[in-house]
Image: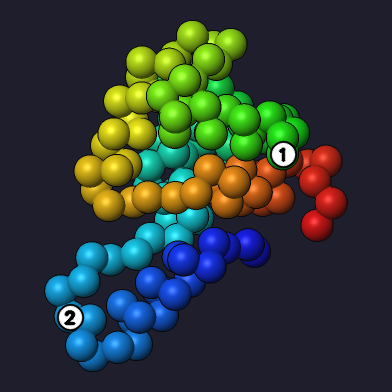
Amino acid sequence: MSYHPDDMARYIYTTFNPEAAGTKRVYSTSEVYKFMCAKCHGINAEGNPEKRGPALNDYTLHELEMELINLDNEGFQSSGGHSELMRENLNRIKKKGMTYHPEDMASYIYYNFNPDAKK
């Protein structure tokens, strides 16, 4: 499992420091995927046609990184044509305080769901 050092520091601070009461909750990349992405992309990134969510478990690590970085920079150019929906979903994620680093999310999806990933 990979993580961004900033996220780990915030997690340790908010979890184990009694003075951190009231500090916003830190969500792991896997929690963000589970709570916000799996609804449309599937619990195993297999996709969900009813929600118009494409499968992600066949993307390479680089493809996932590029899609997520482009989405984060508001330049999402998915071949599926769901850019407006994805921007809306990203705004929901941010409003809930469930931020993530695109590279970390790409790694999470790739190494947990792509059958070709070397574990």
* Residue 119 locus on image (x, y percent): 80, 57
Q: Which picture quadrant has residue 31? A: bottom left
Q: Which mark is residue 21?
A: 2
Residue sticking out furthest to the left: 22
The three-letter code of the residue at mark 1 reads Leu
Q: Which mark is residue 61?
A: 1
Q: Residue at x 53, y 34 (%)?
A: 69
Dot 1 or dot 2: first in sequence order is 2
Q: Callout 1: helix, strand or loop?
A: helix
The three-letter code of the residue at mark 2 reads Ala
* Residue 14 locus on image (x, y percent): 31, 77
Q: Is residue 100 above or below residue 59?
A: below
Quarter of the image where the N terminus is located:
bottom right
Q: Callout 2: helix, strand or loop?
A: loop
Residues tagged 1 and 2 counted as in contact (Cβ below 8 A): no
Estimate the spatial distance between the alpha carbons at disc 1 and disc 2, rounded to whole Å: 37 Å
**Horizontal side of residue 36 vs 110, given as left or right:** left
Q: Nearer the viewer, residue 11 or 38?
A: 11
Q: Residue at x 50, y 49 (%)?
A: 101
Q: Which picture quadrant has residue 94? A: top left
Q: Residue at x 27, y 52 (%)?
A: 97
